[in-house]
Amino acid sequence: MSLYRLLTLLTLALAAAAAYAHHSRPAHFDLDASVSTEGVVSDFLWRNPHIFIYLEVENASGEWEAWELEMQNTVSMTNKGWDANTIKVDDFIRVTGNPHRTEDRYMFVTGIERPADGFVYGDEYAYR
């Protein structure tokens, strides 16, 4: 095997491993656990590679905490009927998701409810 071919194969293998690691939800989130919270949206980032919702949540002591909520990419969510205006700053939402393995107040979203207008979202992909 030529050196060029060996280097090409090695480069492709490393790129594939990096892509898998980035998209390996079980490596980052505990898919066997579920957490729920509710609060007010402070920011909604409609961007790739993942959509993020930032939520202000009042804890049991009455203090406000920032939560980071990760979702799928914009293409997947567009195919589910979402757009950059589906969630807005100051929306009150209830969220369920898989907790991050190492970060507090960080989850991958599996469900959202917005009581003000009855909006409900459940992500069947997010469950596995």
Image: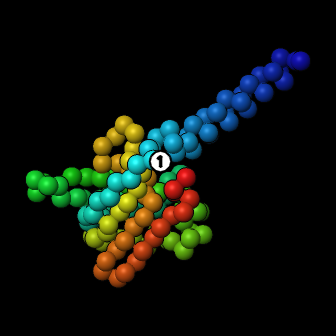
Q: Which residue is mark 1?
A: 31
Residue placed farthest to the left in the image? 61
* Label 1 packing within 10 angstroms: few (<14), some (14-19), many (20+): some
Residue 14 image offset from top left, x and y in percent: 67, 29
At x 40%, y 77%, the residue is 119
Q: With 99 as the anchor, is 92 left or right in this view?
A: left
Residue 127 image offset from top left, x and y in percent: 51, 56
Residue placed farthest to the bottom in the image? 117
At x 51%, y 42%, the residue is 26
Quadrant hosting residue 35: bottom left
Q: With 127 as the anchor, is 40 left or right in this view?
A: left
Residue 86 image offset from top left, x and y in percent: 43, 73
Say which of 108 and 87 sits in front: 108
Q: Secondary structure at mark 1?
A: loop
At x 55%, y 52%, the residue is 128
* Coloration mode: rainbow
- Give the residue type that dot 1 points to: Leu
Q: How many marks?
A: 1
Residue 46 image offset from top left, x and y in percent: 46, 61
At x 37%, y 81%, the residue is 118
Quadrant of the rendering where the N terminus is positioned: top right
Say which of 51 and 109 sits in front: 109
Q: Is residue 52 visible?
A: no
Q: Is residue 118 visible?
A: yes
* Vertical arrangement, residue 7 with respect to residue 35, above or below: above
